[in-house]
Image (spheres, helix red, strand yellow):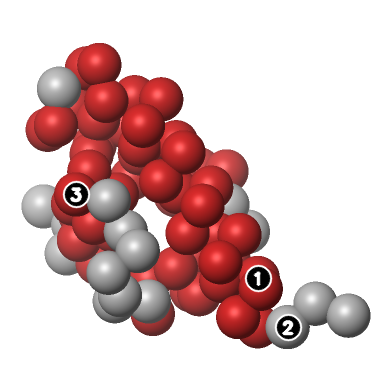
Amino acid sequence: MSTRADSLGRLIYMANQIARNLAMQGPEAAAHATAEHILKYWDPRMKAMILAYDGDALEPITRAAIERIRQPA
């Protein structure tokens, strides 16, 4: 049985992995691309869960991507 904490842990892992894969673009471009990926491909429940998370497990690019989603330009 999967718990909410397990699900959140997987989402954090996935978001950080996306950001790491895009990091070679530079921090700004990678944060933008990570945010775009989450917005385009993640289920609304997944987005809501990662946006509600504000913990230390997010890597800097991932954190910047989440902030971009929370406060679009």
Q: In this view, which residue lies farthest toward the right?
A: 1
Q: Amino acid at mark 2?
A: Thr
Residue that appears at 30% across and 75% down: 55
Q: Is residue 43 left or right of residue 63?
A: right
Residue that appears at 24% across and 37% down: 32
How many residues crowd mark 1 within 10 Å: few (<14), some (14–19), many (20+)? some
Q: Secondary structure at mark 1?
A: helix
State how far apart marks 1 and 2 are (Cα): 6 Å
The spot of residue 66 in percent (x, y) is 28, 58
Point out the tag, 2 or 3, that comes first from the N-terminus.
2
Cβ–Cβ below 8 Å for labels 1 and 2? Answer: yes
Residue identifier under label 1: 7
The spot of residue 5 in percent (x, y) is 60, 80
Q: Secondary structure at mark 3?
A: helix
The spot of residue 62 in percent (x, y) is 29, 49
Residue identifier under label 3: 60
Residue identifier under label 2: 3
| Residue 25 quadrant | top left
Residue that appears at 56% across and 66% down: 9
